């Protein structure tokens, strides 16, 4: 998850809360998992949500790609 946190830019004082994940499995040589996070402000209110797609090649050299989409 550390790599996911690096991809999500949040302001000082805000935190990310893990909301769950879904393993999509292997397709076209990629093993894909979807993760959801909520960004909370210092008062503990949800500011926005993020969906992180984390995919890795099932064949060497096992390249990894992480993309983030934001929804308000």
Image: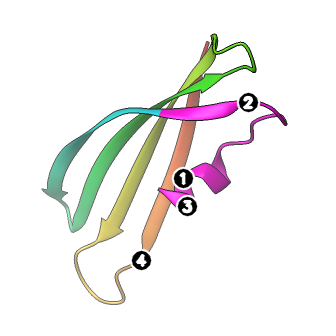
Q: Nearer the viewer, residue 42 or 6?
A: 42
Tell me the residue that label 3 is attached to: 3
Tell me the residue that label 4 is attached to: 63
Q: Are marks 1 and 2 in contact (CB under 8 Å)?
A: no
Nearer the camera: disc 3 or disc 2: 2
Q: Earlier in the sequence, mark 2 or mark 4?
A: 2
- Mark 1 element type: helix
For the residues labelled 2 and 4, the Cα–Cα distance comes to: 31 Å
Residue 47 picture location, percent across and down: 67, 14
Which residue corresponds to the image point at 53% horizontal and 48% vertical from the top-left? Answer: 67
For the residues labelled 1 and 3, the Cα–Cα distance comes to: 4 Å
Q: Is residue 46 above or below residue 14?
A: above
- Mark 3 element type: helix
Q: Are marks 1 and 3 in contact (CB under 8 Å)?
A: yes
Specify the farthest residue to the bottom: 60
Query: What number is the disc on residue 14?
Result: 2
Q: Earlier in the sequence, mark 3 or mark 2?
A: 3
Start-end of magenta stretch:
1-17
Q: Earlier in the sequence, mark 4 or mark 1?
A: 1
Query: What number is the disc on residue 27?
Result: none
- Mark 4 element type: loop
Q: Nearer the viewer, residue 15 or 67?
A: 15
Tell me the residue that label 1 is attached to: 4
Q: Residues within 10 Å of mark 2 (few under 14, many from 20)?
A: some
- Mark 2 element type: loop
Q: Are marks 3 and 2 in contact (CB under 8 Å)?
A: no
Which residue corresponds to the image point at 75% horizontal and 36% vertical from the top-left? Answer: 10
For the residues labelled 4 and 1, the Cα–Cα distance comes to: 16 Å
């Amino acid at each position: 998850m550390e790599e996911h946190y690096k991809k999500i830019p949040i302001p000082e004082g805000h935190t990310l809360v893990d909301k769950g994940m879904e393993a999509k499995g292997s397709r076209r040589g990629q093993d894909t998992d979807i993760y959801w996070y909520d960004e909370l402000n210092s008062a503990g209110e949800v500011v926005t949500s993020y969906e992180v797609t984390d995919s890795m090649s099932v064949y060497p050299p096992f390249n990894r790609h992480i993309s983030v989409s934001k929804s308000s």
